[in-house]
């Protein structure tokens, strides 16, 4: 977690009525003095760690090609993906 994540959490927590005061404890480091806030922070961290990784456009297209090829039982090709994307309403830059 970054400082920016912590700041976002504290802003959200305080907006919900939680106290975001911290203290430093031996062996634990910086913790929140309010137990509900501490548990909320642990949940916030778990939720942030669970986010799916961001994919590049190329990786996303590759995944789509593989899924489409499975659907149509064909080796994946650009034309199959392009047809499926157009059928879904996607318009390409050169078509705009």
Image (spheres, rainbow, N blue to C red):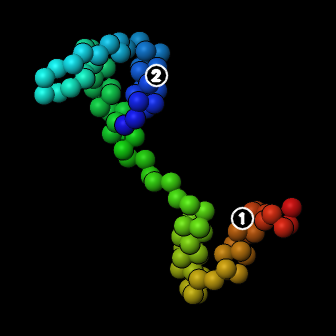
Choose top left, top right, bottom left or bottom right for residue 91. Answer: bottom right
Q: Where is residue 66 drawn, in percent x and y?
A: 54, 76
Q: Is residue 35 visible?
A: no
Query: Is 45 placed left or right of 61 in the picture?
Result: left
Residue 13, numbered circle:
none
Q: Which residue is mark 1?
A: 88
Looking at the image, is mark 2 or mark 1 nearer the viewer? 2
Horizontally, residue 74 falls left or right of residue 53, namely right
Q: Residue at x 72, y 65 (%)?
A: 88
Residues marked 2 and 1 touching at CB (< 8 Å): no
Farthest residue toward the left?
27
**Quick check: 28 left or right of 34?**
left
Label 2 sits on a secondary structure element that is: helix
Residue drawn at x 21%, y 19% as measured from the top left? 24
Q: Position of residue 52 (x, y in %)?
A: 44, 52
Residue 5 image position (x, y, % from top left): 43, 32
Q: Position of residue 9 (x, y in %)?
A: 42, 26
Give the distance between the C-alpha atoms of the residues marked 2 and 1, in whole angstroms: 37 Å
Residue at 46% x, 20% y is 11
User: Which of the image's four quarters has the N terminus?
Assistant: top left
Q: Is residue 93 above or below residue 50?
A: below
Q: Is residue 41 above or below residue 54?
A: above
Q: Nearer the viewer, residue 90 or 22?
A: 22
| Mark 1 surroundings: few (<14), some (14-19) or many (≥20) residues within 10 A | few
Disc 2 or 1, which lies upstream in sequence?
Answer: 2
Measuring 70% from the left and 81% from the top, which residue is drawn there?
A: 79
- Tell me: 32 left or right of 76: left
Seen in the picture, residue 38 relative to 72 is either above or below; the reply is above
Mark identifier at residue 12:
2
From where the camera sits, is residue 33 visible?
A: yes
As displayed, is residue 72 above or below residue 67? below
Q: Which quarter of the picture shows residue 47?
A: top left
């Amino acid at each position: 977690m970054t400082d920016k994540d912590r700041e976002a959490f504290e802003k959200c927590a305080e907006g919900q009525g939680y106290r975001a005061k911290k203290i430093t404890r031996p062996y634990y480091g910086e913790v929140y003095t309010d137990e509900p806030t501490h548990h909320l922070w642990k949940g916030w961290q778990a939720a942030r760690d669970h986010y799916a990784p961001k994919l590049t456009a190329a990786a996303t297209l590759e995944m789509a090609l593989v899924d489409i090829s499975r659907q149509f039982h064909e080796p994946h090709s650009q034309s199959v993906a392009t047809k499926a994307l157009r059928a879904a309403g996607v318009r390409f830059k050169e078509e705009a």
